Image (tube, rainbow, N blue to C red):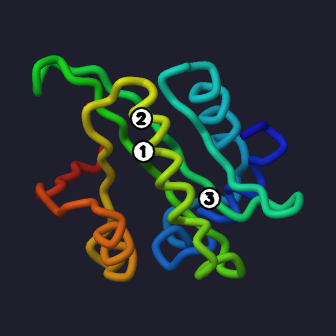
């Protein structure tokens, strides 16, 4: 992803039942976040290009930790595929790329969370081999 992709990525984040209520029209926070994430090699902002159009996006982050014998974890966040591109295997290709990149970097685990209000997303992730193994909890700050 490059900075020029940012408006299209924000549009993908907003074009979502949940995202419509939590994203903002102000580009400044996205520009700050992009700069911070882009500057850190432990985080990758990824777009799927479909003939010059951003058709999908996600963030892949690598988290070192002490648990699991000091294992490196790969965390997937913000997965979105444009409505017009759904059903063509793009989301699956993006997640398979994440798994391959995580293996290449030596991660022991690829993890993600999905909102309980997205049953279709859960079925999609389960079809790709992800297992619902934990209960995610959040504390708004």
Q: Secondary structure at mark 1?
A: helix
Q: Is residue 20 above or below residue 65?
A: below
> Given the current orientation, which residue lies at the most extreme right position?
52
Quadrant for the N terminus, please.
top right
State how far apart marks 3 and 2 are (Cα): 31 Å
Label pair 2/1, CB-CB below 8 angstroms: yes
Vertical placement of residue 18 versus 42, above or below? below
Q: In terms of image quadrants, where is residue 86? A: bottom right
Instruction: Residue at 12%, 57% (x, y): give it.
Output: 133
Q: Residue at x 51, y 58 (%)?
A: 79
Label disc, if present, on residue 99 of the rendered structure: 1
Residue 102: give its label.
2
Decide if residue 95 is on the left or right side of residue 129. Answer: right
Q: Residues within 10 Å of mark 2 (few under 14, many from 20)?
A: many
Residue nearest the viewer, comparing 32 with 129: 129
Please report the residue visible at 51 percent of the width from the left and 64 percent of the height from the top. Answer: 92
Q: Residue 45 or 49: which is nearer the viewer?
A: 49
* Front tag of 3 and 2: 2
Taking 30 as reference, is 124 above or below it?
Answer: below
Within 10 angstroms of label 1, few (less than 14), some, or many (20 or more) residues?
Answer: some
Q: Is residue 92 left or right of residue 25?
A: left
Quarter of image, res 28 = top right
Q: On screen, 86 above or below 42?
A: below
Residue at image mark 3: 24
Q: Tell which circle, 3 or 2, labels the residue nearer the N-terminal end.
A: 3
At numbered mark 2, what does the secondary structure look like: helix, strand or loop?
A: helix
């Amino acid at each position: 992803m490059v900075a020029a992709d940012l408006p299209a990525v924000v549009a993908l984040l907003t074009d979502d039942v949940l995202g419509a209520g939590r994203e903002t029209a102000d580009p400044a926070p996205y520009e700050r976040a992009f700069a911070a994430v882009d500057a850190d090699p432990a985080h990758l902002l990824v777009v799927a290009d479909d003939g010059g159009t951003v058709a999908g996006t996600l963030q892949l982050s690598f988290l070192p930790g002490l648990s699991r014998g000091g294992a490196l974890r790969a965390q997937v966040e913000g997965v979105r595929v444009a409505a017009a591109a759904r059903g063509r295997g793009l989301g699956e290709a993006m997640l398979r790329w994440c798994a391959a990149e995580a293996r290449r970097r030596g991660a022991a685990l690829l993890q993600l969370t999905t909102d309980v209000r997205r049953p279709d997303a859960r079925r999609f992730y389960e079809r790709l081999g992800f297992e619902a193994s934990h209960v995610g909890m959040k504390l708004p700050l």
